[in-house]
């Protein structure tokens, strides 16, 4: 049961995506543009908040002076920590771009669908 101790980020992202899709389908049945757009924007805000909490501080444990870097082990430790932080920031930025793209597609498609229904001959 070690897998329950610390859930993988992939499963958290998939869980959020499933919850968003289920909620989006429920809201879409009401056929209300304003309600759907509000739901999408609130979900986007929550996704960005969760993503921002995932980013660690830039370069944690930065040395105070040069004398701390004279030892090769300490220098390697600081470089590894900096590299890990840059990898986390890069992954978070990639996720941010993906999330923004998906939410924009959802918003634009809903607006286009709404205006097609409004302008169709009755």
Image (cartoon, grey):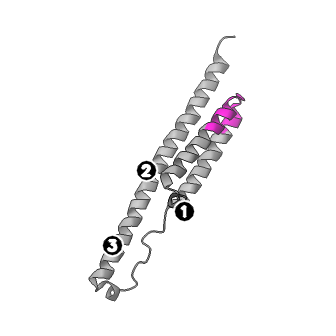
User: Is tag 1's residue or tag 2's residue first in the polypeptide sequence?
Assistant: 1
Q: What residue sits right under mark 2 in the picture? A: 94
Kindly report the distance in space between the C-alpha atoms of the residues bearing marks 3 and 2.
22 Å
With respect to residue 43, does 79 lie above or below? below
Q: What residue sits right under mark 3 in the picture? A: 79
Q: What residue sits right under mark 1 in the picture? A: 5
Is 68 displayed left or right of 118 in the figure?
left
Of all residues, the one furthest to the top in this rendering is: 122
Tag nearer the camera, 3 or 1: 1
Q: Main secondary structure of the magenta part?
A: helix
Query: What percent of the width, then of the height, locates residue 119?
Result: 64, 18
Query: What percent of the width, then of the height, locates residue 5?
Result: 54, 62
Please state the extent of the stretch shown in magenta in the rendering.
22-37
Say which element carries label 3.
helix
Say which element carries label 1.
loop
**Is the C terminus in the top left, top right, bottom left or bottom right quadrant?**
top right
Q: Identify which residue is drawn at 61% across, 43% down.
A: 19
Q: Identify which residue is drawn at 33% across, 72% down.
A: 79
Kindly report the distance in space between the C-alpha atoms of the residues bearing marks 3 and 1.
29 Å
């Amino acid at each position: 049961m070690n897998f329950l101790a610390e859930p993988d980020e992939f499963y958290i992202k998939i869980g959020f995506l499933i919850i968003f899709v289920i909620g989006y389908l429920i809201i879409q049945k009401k056929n209300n543009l304003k309600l759907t757009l509000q739901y999408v924007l609130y979900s986007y805000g929550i996704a960005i908040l969760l993503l921002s909490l995932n980013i660690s501080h830039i370069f944690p444990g930065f040395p105070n002076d040069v004398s701390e870097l004279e030892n090769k082990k300490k220098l390697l430790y600081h470089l590894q920590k900096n590299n890990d932080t840059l990898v986390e920031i890069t992954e978070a930025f990639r996720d941010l771009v993906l999330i923004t793209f998906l939410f924009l597609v959802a918003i634009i498609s809903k607006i286009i669908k709404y205006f097609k229904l409004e302008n169709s001959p009755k």
